[in-house]
Image: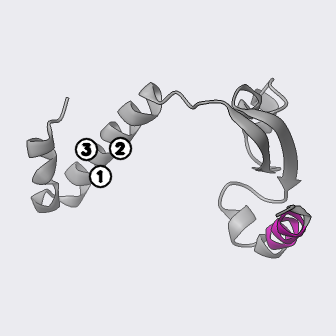
Amino acid sequence: MDTPIEMSNITRMPDNERLDKIARAYGRVIEKYVPGRYAGGVTVFISEEGPIKLVTDPTFGWGRVAAEVKIIKVPGNHITCITTHVKVLAEHLRHCIEAVEV
C-alpha cells in the first residue's frame, strides 16, 4: 500500500507510472467505501448503450442507498451521452431541477 510520503512524490513520476498509481489508489478507495443510507430520492441517468443488459438490479445498486430511485435512460454511451447527446441529457436535467421542491 502506498504511504502518504510515497504519494507525495507522484508529481515527479512519468505520466504512465503516475496514472497507474492513481488508478490503483482510486480502486482501493472504491473497494472500501461503504455508503450510508440516504432518506431522500435520487435520479440516475443511464446511457442506453451501456452495460444495462448485464445489470439485474433495476436500480443499478442505488436502491441499497436511497429511499427512492428514479432511472432515466439517455441516448448514447458513457461518453456520447455527455457529448453527442448532451442536449437530451440537459433537457432531462432541466426537468429534474424544475421538479425539486425547495
Residue at image position (31%, 39%) is 25
Residue 53 figure quarter: top right
Look at the image and say whether residue 95 sits in the magenta stretch.
yes
Residue at the farthest front position: 102
Residue 90 figure quarter: bottom right
Look at the image and say whether residue 50 sits in the magenta stretch.
no
Q: Are marks 3 and 1 in contact (CB under 8 Å)?
A: yes
Residue at image position (81%, 66%) is 93
How many neighbours does mark 3 have within 10 angstroms: few (below 14), some (14-19), or many (20 or more)? some
Write down the residue under mark 2.
23
Q: Which residues are magenta?
A: 88-98
Q: Position of residue 91 (x, y in %)?
A: 87, 72
Secondary element at image label 3: helix
| Disc 3 to disc 1, C-alpha distance | 5 Å
Write down the residue under mark 1.
19
Write down the residue under mark 3.
21
Q: Position of residue 2 (x, y in %)?
A: 17, 35
